[in-house]
Amino acid sequence: DIQMTQSPSTLSASVGDRVTITCRASQSISRWLAWYQHKPGKAPKLLISAASTLESGVPSRFSGSVSGTEFTLAISSLQPDDFATYYCQQYSSYSVTFGQGTKLEIK
Amino acid sequence: QVQLVQSGAEVKKPGASVRVSCKASGYTFTGSYMHWVRQAPGQGLEWMGWINPASGATNYAQSFQGRVTLTRDISVSTVYMELARMMSDDTAVYYCARGNRQDQLLFSDSWGQGTRVTVSS
């Protein structure tokens, strides 16, 4: 299976900050990478698919980019509702893999 | 509305198997893949596999190959996940999750409520 290495595992930031989360794939996955936001007791919410396509209704402060096998989720100006755990997910083959997750905490 | 209702909590001894069910309603059961994902205490999400309810085709994560089996019963719109030879590190909450309409390998926002499985002697 393709491995996804996500970093950092924890990120402390303040409202208004710009933050980035990175996922590196163990082999080429083209642009088959999604990002989810997960809050306790709720289903993960799909934010971005195909590395950089924002899902309908997701605020434009979220963006995704790719360089080779390294994928980045950026949040341009953190809002209180953004503090959650974020996961990347590759879906380049019939199998899928999650990254380890990044917990975004209020500083 | 779409609902995925899972069976109740289980406590199993090491070496035993568990079978968790996920009953779907509110949509065409054969129209979406069903994934299984687990979350161990304090850990992240771990994908286990998917089943295509229309054909019965399955795909499993390599780490679960030979231990997990996904099946479905179309007559009752239910998917089953069986995990064999469990050990203590299989203690987790197990979720079923419907595939996304745009791409079945993505996850929709329809997830089951989770089934807590505890493996303990």
Image (cartoon, coloured by chain):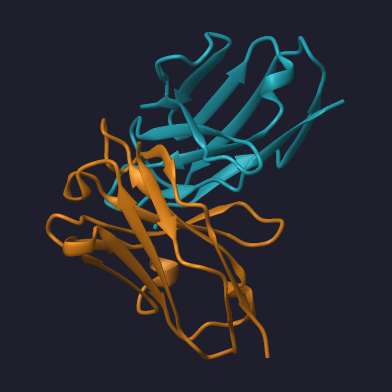
Q: How many marks?
A: 0
Left or right of A37 in this view: B54: left
Shown in orange, the chain is B
Q: In the rendering, at what x and y percent does residue B94 appear?
A: 51, 62
Q: In the rendering, at what x and y percent does residue B77 appear?
A: 24, 58
Quarter of the figure that contains the N terminus of chain A: bottom left
Relative depth, front residue between B12 and B35: B12
Residue at far right of view: A107
Residue at far left of view: B55
Q: Residue at x 17, y 50 (%)?
A: B30
Quarter of the figure that contains the C terminus of chain A: top right
Q: In the rendering, at what x and y percent does residue A18 appear?
A: 71, 14
Quadrant position of residue B61: bottom left
Q: Is residue A28 above or below residue B95?
A: above
The tint of chain A in the picture is: cyan
Left or right of B74 in this view: B94: right
